[in-house]
Image: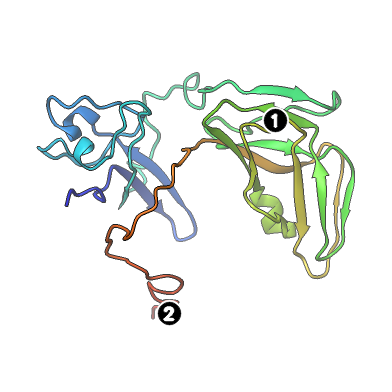
Amino acid sequence: MPAADKPTTTIQIQGDGQSFSVNRTPVSLEEWSGAGTEAVDSGMQPAYRDSDPLIERAGMCDRNRGSIARTIEYVTVSHETAVANPADTAAEYGAPTLQIQLKMLDAGLEAPSYAHPGDAGADLRARVDVSLAPGERKLVPTGVSIGLPNGFVALIHPRSGLATKHGLTVVNAPGTVDAGYRGEISVTLLNTDKNQAIELKRGDRIAQMVIQRVEYAQFVAVDELSDTSRGTGGFGSTGGFAPAVG
């Protein structure tokens, strides 16, 4: 069986006891796939090489779509090595890679924007003032409508600061904005705090929108599914909480 579950990219992890940072180690696709293999580079740099052209035999590369199965290998690194690629200059790092049609339904609100270069989520803002009692949820409009290209989705995530400090989250996180939707994006917010109400003002950042590629699947009926090492193991199959150290 082809080793389709081998790592295809290496992620460096630097921990300080409370947080970690990551950095990908690139290896050329040509080296990994083997000489003579026509592979489409989808932007992933695999972290291992094999003399056999496993990409096509394992179904890991589709010449028409350029998709590659992604299994990640995590490696621990020091502070000195967990840095951004020096080739990523300020002008290049976090530069737009896709154009999205945007229609603002409220001229008084800021358009979706990224707080920092390289951020995955663009901030969405409340179109109206909102008061959320403990345990209450409300659908909050953002004044934003978008036209996504075919093959993309917008996922609406909670903002980490509001979640941590105030217990504010998105009920159906991540919310899904399909490519065919052209209406206003609204966010179902939930106050999970048991005691404190949350007051949001018009223009406050309430969620973040992440644009991602998606695959459109064709579901093929079979008598038996392919075998894996996990099999039918579901909830709790990998064990419970680890015992305290020390």
Q: Position of residue 57 (x, y in %)?
A: 19, 40
**Which numbered disc covers residue 36?**
none
Q: CA distance from mark 2 to mark 1?
A: 43 Å
112 vs 186: above or below: above
Q: Nearer the viewer, residue 86 or 192?
A: 192
Please name the residue shown 18% across and 39% down the image.
54
Q: Is residue 40 left or right of residue 240?
A: left
- Quadrant of the rendered structure where residue 70 is? top left
From the viewer's perspective, tell me whether residue 26 is left or right of residue 49.
right
Marker count (numbered):
2
User: Toward which corner of the image does residue 30 lie, by quadrant?
Assistant: top left
Marks 2/1 in contact by CB < 8 Å: the verdict is no
Residue at figure coordinates x 32%, y 59% from the top left: 225
Residue 85: percent from the left, percent from the top? Answer: 37, 30
SS at circle 2:
loop
Relative to 12, does residue 84 appear above or below in the rendering? Answer: above
Q: Amino acid at mark 1?
A: Pro
Q: Name the residue nearer the viewer: 107 or 139.
A: 139
Measured from the top left, where is residue 218 in percent x and y?
A: 44, 42
Residue at 35% of width from left, 26% of height from top?
A: 64
Name the foreground residue: 49 vs 182: 182
Q: Secondary structure at mark 1?
A: loop
For mark 1, what is the residue?
A: 112
Q: Identify the residue under disc 2.
A: 244
